[in-house]
Image (tube, coloured by chain):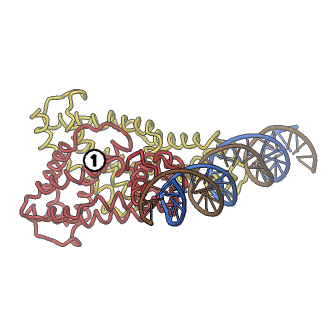
Chain colours: A yellow, B red, C blue, D brown
Amino acid sequence: MSTSRKRLSPADREKQILTEAIRFFADQGFDGQTRQLADRIGITQPLLYRYFASKEQLIERVYQEVYVGRWKPEWEELLRDRDIPLEERLLAFYQQYARVVDNREWIRILILAGMKKEELTRRYLSLIRTKLILPICVELRVSLGLPEVGAEDLTPPEIELVWAFHGTFFYRSVRRWVYEMPVEADIDTMVKESVTTFLTGASTTIPRIVGGA
Amino acid sequence: MSTSRKRLSPADREKQILTEAIRFFADQGFDGQTRQLADRIGITQPLLYRYFASKEQLIERVYQEVYVGRWKPEWEELLRDRDIPLEERLLAFYQQYARVVDNREWIRILILAGMKKEELTRRYLSLIRTKLILPICVELRVSLGLPEVGAEDLTPPEIELVWAFHGTFFYRSVRRWVYEMPVEADIDTMVKESVTTFLTGASTTIPRIVGGA
DNA sequence: GCTGGTATTTATCAAACGATAAATACAGGG
DNA sequence: CCCTGTATTTATCGTTTGATAAATACCAGC
């Protein structure tokens, strides 16, 4: 992996290309040229094709590396753990999740992928809905002393409300890493204030939303 | 502007090209080919260059058309009008603003522009900060009975909190128009619940944030 | 209905770009 | 130290793509 060695083992070279490709496409977009990518790595352009059959296939691997690799299955358990107050669960979860999202490569590639390959990002958003949004809705109801319901009995407005809360962290990352604007507060502060504000507000609005239905 | 006529006046043709270019680039991204754009309009590709010196310049015009054209200066006055309760002001404003944002071309081109031309989108976000976010922070303080302050005396956490609230509408539009996911509730409902939840939560958290400083 | 101005098209260039095949040079095993 | 396998480079092809120049055809005004 050092810069001096010229011949690398196939495994090392492939990993090196993939790592640099993530940075490169996050910067330049997917229409970045393979020649530029090769320059950045310090290899010749045809060598890329020894390791990846086509540019398209390299991009596919970039997706997998970035999104499959950074999802933590234990989050799903954490959110459901009723031994811990919901506020603490949300704080703990979003302090981890917001750190994953607040990453230049992660957010930029997710956005680029959305513009090109909708089916891939649709799958990712469905995962978020099933594993995060709907469970949080259910836990909210329980935490507010409302009767427990299954995911299918939730109302659209309360789901949308949790989506909105969740999107808060997405938007901060877009401002920072896509629009290159300074953000006003550090992640921990932002998570803390967002979670408290949301929970305080939701304790009032959710009972009205589901009660009035 | 009808499909039958072959020769259009320069003004009409330019407008037609621009309108179609907005749709086209929103769909295909800015690396969409000029030949495809011309096909879609029903003209030949070189004709584009009679009206726009280069592809780059056409894209510049697309930016202007979409962002300069859809900003309503009266929003700034509305938000400051203390004869109306803040909740009503926010409801009225975001019911308009969310409709502008909830538009396929608007959101997709804003995102594409962020990936390519940061300086343009940075200017737009600065506008939002100055004309929307900071004024809302000030009005929030007043509405909560706190002493009035200038924009320069606001604290980072409270600014970040309002950014987060604002981003709510951005994220909904991204889910819908970039990731092509169904949204759970219509705009009016979503605006209503978001504003109430935010204001209810902020009434508790903002005094603590600014009081504890 | 002809004619002149110009909106539009046809033909084409040059550079950019993804991809492939053949040549080369590095490194480990004997 | 040489030799062999293969990682890597050099040379190059075929398209694609933004852009230009010359040819054409539409339409208004006399």
Q: Residues within 10 Å of mark 1 (few under 14, many from 20)?
A: some
Looking at this view, is A211 or B170 the one in front? B170
Drawn side of residue C26 relative to residue A20, left or right: right
Is residue A116 something one can see in this rendering? yes
Image height of A147 relative to B148, above or below: above
Tell me the quarter of the picture where residue A186 sits. bottom left
In the picture, measured across the screen, residue A55 lies left or right of residue B213, that is right
Q: Which chain is disc 1 placed on?
A: A
Q: Position of residue C18 (x, y in %)?
A: 63, 45
What residue does disc 1 label? A91
Q: Quick one: quadrant of the C terminus of chain A?
A: top left
* SS assignment at label 1: helix
Residue A144's image quarter? Answer: top left
**Residue A154 on image: x %, y %:** 21, 31
Question: In the displayed structure, would residue A211 be above or below residue A40?
Answer: above
| Residue B112 placement (x, y as % from top left) | 43, 53
The reply, left or right, for residue A83 in relation to residue B47 is left
A12, above or below B127, in the image: above
Q: Residue at x 29, y 47 (%)?
A: B102
Residue A76 position, x and y percent, is: 34, 35
B14 or B195: which is nearer to us? B14
Residue type highlighted by circle 1: Leu
Judged left or right of residue C4, residue A83 is left
Depth check: give the residue in front, B11 or B192: B11
